[in-house]
Amino acid sequence: MERSILNALIEAQNQKRAVALLTDFDSEETILVDASGVVRGAALDDATVRTVLERLHQDKSGTVETPDGRTWFVRAYNPPLRLMIIGAVHTAQVLAPMAKMAGYDVTLIDPRSAFANADRFPGVTLMDAWPDKALEQLDLDHRSAVVTLSHDPKFDEPALTASVRSPAFYIGALGSRRTHARRVERLQEAGLSEREINRIHGPVGLPIGSLSPAEIAISILAEMTQALRRPAAS
């Protein structure tokens, strides 16, 4: 691998930027493609770049053939998936370990230390800052998901406001349709645009008839997966 390609790959990983590394099976020549389609190394045709970006988005390595008959192995290098949960409630206690099993780095945000503690959330990163301030520190990116569960507008709505103005791929808010309708009214009064509000999945989760905290957590993780893997369907 050329040193310039290796250095660019290391820099992208350090900065948590998504890139794809292409390696020619025969010559071992390498090409780097970032998430915006910028190519470092030999030129690639537009159709191949689109295929590479699709693989990168799907987090799926594999082979691709270019019009000149060359076969390349595409290795996707994505930053880690992250889930930020707002509210140390019962559903969060189930969702956190489920999300970790699905490959997410989980952070639980709640300033109430009586609820957000290691006894109730073992192995989960805890932040006791106010949700909007915590999310600013976490620097949400396109591999980030945010779910508000506290059912308390003073926690949930500042977090939602910060989230919809970020590149986060999924934003969900717990509550009934009536609760979410009232929430939307308040967010509109706070100055959020229709486009920003429409980014919020509310009520959170796929409509599978969930009742218990575990069932709600399943529906949330399923909808997150859909948003991540099949964005046109979310």
Image: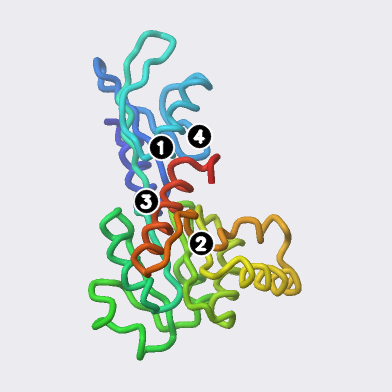
N-term mark: 2 or 4: 4
Name the foreground residue: 169 vs 28.
Answer: 169
Judging by the rendered image, the residue that carries numbered circle 4 is 38
Quarter holding residue 91: bottom left
| Residue, disc 1 | 56
| Gap between marks 4 and 1 measured at Cα | 13 Å
Tell me the residue at 28%/60% (across/down): 100
Q: Residues within 10 Å of mark 3 (few under 14, many from 20)?
A: some
Res 144 → quadrant: bottom left
Mark 1, Cα crowd under 10 Å, few <14 / some 14-19 / many 20+, is many
Residue beneath the point at 62% across and 68% down: 180
In the image as oriented, which residue stretches furthest toward the bottom? 114
N-term mark: 2 or 3: 3
Q: Residues within 10 Å of mark 4 (few under 14, many from 20)?
A: few
Residue 197, which numbered label?
none
- Which residue position is annotated with label 2? 204
Residue flagged by tag 3: what amino acid is it? Pro
**Closer to the camera, 58 or 234?**
234
SS for callout 4? loop
Residue type of the residue flagged with mark 4: Val
Judge left or right: residue 157 versus residue 226. right
| Place of residue 183 in the rendered image (x, y in percent of width and height, measured from the top left) | 65, 72
Return the disc, 4 or 1, that comes first in the chain's sequence: 4
Residue flagged by tag 2: what amino acid is it? Val
